[in-house]
Amino acid sequence: MALPIMAKATAVWLVDNTTLTFKQISDFCGLHELEVNGIADGEVAQGIKGFDPIANNQLTAEEIKKGEDSPLYKLQLMFNAAAEGEQKRRGPRYTPLSKRQDRPASILWLVKFHPELSDGQISKLVGTTKPTIQALRDRSHWNIANIQPIDPVALGLCKQIELDAAVQKAAKKAAKDGVAISDEERSKLVSTEQSLSMDTEPKMPASMSGLENFSLAQEEPNKEEAILDAESLFNLPASDDED
């Protein structure tokens, strides 16, 4: 259920300006009923200024009136972009200056854990350029040694709903083109918490593949060749002195 912005301040306003029940206010604001009771008693949310949900387009006066007339009525939140998620954006994403230094880490995370995403999709998610994405893909970026992959959702560069939508779109396109995601790639799709605590797994270069068995083979010579016939050592040809 979508909640109003500044939920506790909204609850303060509703307690002070309406006759809604504590249950109605707690359901609407996502608070516990006892917490709303504490707000009414002055024990909770002291110093918090009430946030008018009517003036901020979260409730209408008619909706509040319905709730006051019927204690069992549940208030309905009006559509709010902050609560429901951003509307579809047109044009490139603007990234604040304070977060632009985090973009390479988020791009590296997307490239590593969501290889099915195209450069265009990554560009829209975190607001970057395709040359930067390509440099991180082939690890030719000037600062690649110091960049650790971090989930862009955790960095605040995009919303989880936007990332999920992009991944689903890429998966549908791959299925339409007849390109299935391998189990190895699918296993890389992890949650934000897992990706932040995950260590980079070392891998053996492809040029060295198969050499791990070579040394073992060298250490185990043919046992049949190593067995000596003891009798052959004593059955030597007779010398001339014995004649």
Image: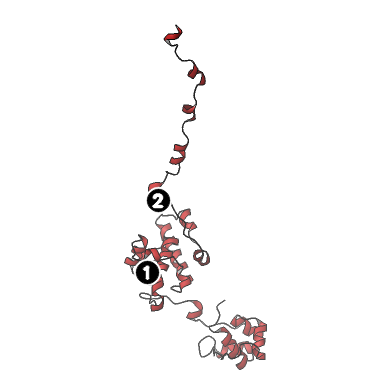
Label 1: state its secondary structure. Answer: helix
The answer to whether mark 1 and mark 2 are in CB contact below 8 A is no
Which residue in the rendered view is the most extreme toward the front?
A: 241
Which residue in the rendered view is the most extreme toward the left?
A: 131
Badge 1: few (under 14), some or many (20 or more) residues near its Cα, within 10 Å? some
Badge 2: few (under 14), some or many (20 or more) residues near its Cα, within 10 Å? few
Q: Residue at (38%, 70%) from the top-left corner?
A: 124
Tell me the CA gap for discs 1 and 2. Answer: 30 Å
Q: Say whether residue 144 is visible.
A: yes
x and y percentages locating residue 214 in the rendered image: 43, 40
Q: What type is the residue that disc 2 sits on?
A: Pro
The circle on residue 207 is none
Q: Say whether residue 72 is visible.
A: no
Image quadrant holding the C terminus, namely top left
Image quadrant holding the N terminus, namely bottom right
Relative horizontal placement of residue 82, taking residue 46 as reference (left or right): left
Q: Is residue 137 above or below residue 50?
A: above
Label 2: state its secondary structure. Answer: loop
Q: What type is the residue that disc 1 sits on?
A: Ser
x and y percentages locating residue 90 in the rendered image: 37, 76
The circle on residue 123 is 1
- Provide the residue designation for mark 2: 205
